[in-house]
Image (spheres, rainbow, N blue to C red):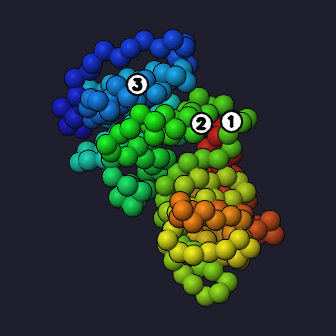
Amino acid sequence: MHKGFGVAAAPIPPSTRKATARAALVDIKEPARGILADCFKQFGVECVVLTGDVEERLQREKFAACVVKLAPGAEAVMDAARSSLSNSRMIIYGLGGNAQQAMSYSKYGINAIFHEPLERSAALKLVRATQMLVLHEFRRYVRIPVITEVSVTTSDGRRFTATSQEISSGGMSMRSDEEVSPGLSTEISFALLTLPRIWVRSTVSWRKPAAKSFGVRFDLQDERRLRIKEWVDAYLES
């Protein structure tokens, strides 16, 4: 790890709510650092600016989440987190770029992206949407945000690639420019961290054209979906 990868720590305003989890900030500069700290503290998450040997700290300290700038050095940070016994299932946020650029980090199971320039409202919306996973409050949150490449084959003979947004034991949401309609039968293929590439039959359950997103429901008769359920259960229990 580059010893100077992090940036000098700046005072972070104390939270009015007792912190129950910690989020590591890696190579995040102001004003993004202050915005993120403020957004996370609203949900009881303390932001810790990592400096020095960031990889070593991720190996020995426990964090519920990590926000890392998508720049040279990010891959080493993600690798250190995923290979750590205590942080292998942490929620990893990228800062900068877009979902397509984040695909280069997909093998590390990057969960979500804060886009630059960082806007407080957008950042707060993303933290609110994912804070149940960060705080391990899974009874109300069973969908796991994760970005990975998904190969889609439709019953009408089309093949295209989509980018996953969230996955659960019953289905997946993703983004694509391709036009699909609810009820369309598909077979999708993807890989996730410790889950080797898997194929499963599914049906398009909804479509939001403005957001270029759609969701599929896994076929209950396809036993291959059980591997996805096992992976989701293991992710939530870790």
User: Which type of secondary structure does the marked residue at label 2 adopt?
Assistant: helix
| Tag 1 residue | 138
Rendered image: mark on residue 133:
2
What is the three-letter code of the residue carrying label 2?
Leu
> Residue 208 in the image: x percent, y percent?
60, 62
Q: CA distance from mark 2 to mark 1?
A: 6 Å
Rendered image: mark on residue 129:
none
Task: Give the answer, above or below, for where 124 lies relative to 145.
Answer: above
Rendered image: mark on residue 37:
3
Name which of mark 3 and mark 2 comes first in the sequence: 3
Among the 4 quarters of the image, the one containing residue 106: bottom left
Task: Classify 10 Å Cα crowding around label 3: few (below 14), some (14-19), many (20 and above).
Answer: many
Name which of mark 3 and mark 1 comes first in the sequence: 3
What is the three-letter code of the residue carrying label 1?
Phe
For the point 31% across and 43% down, the residue is: 117
Q: Nearer the viewer, residue 224 or 13?
A: 13
> Residue 149 in the image: x percent, y percent?
48, 64
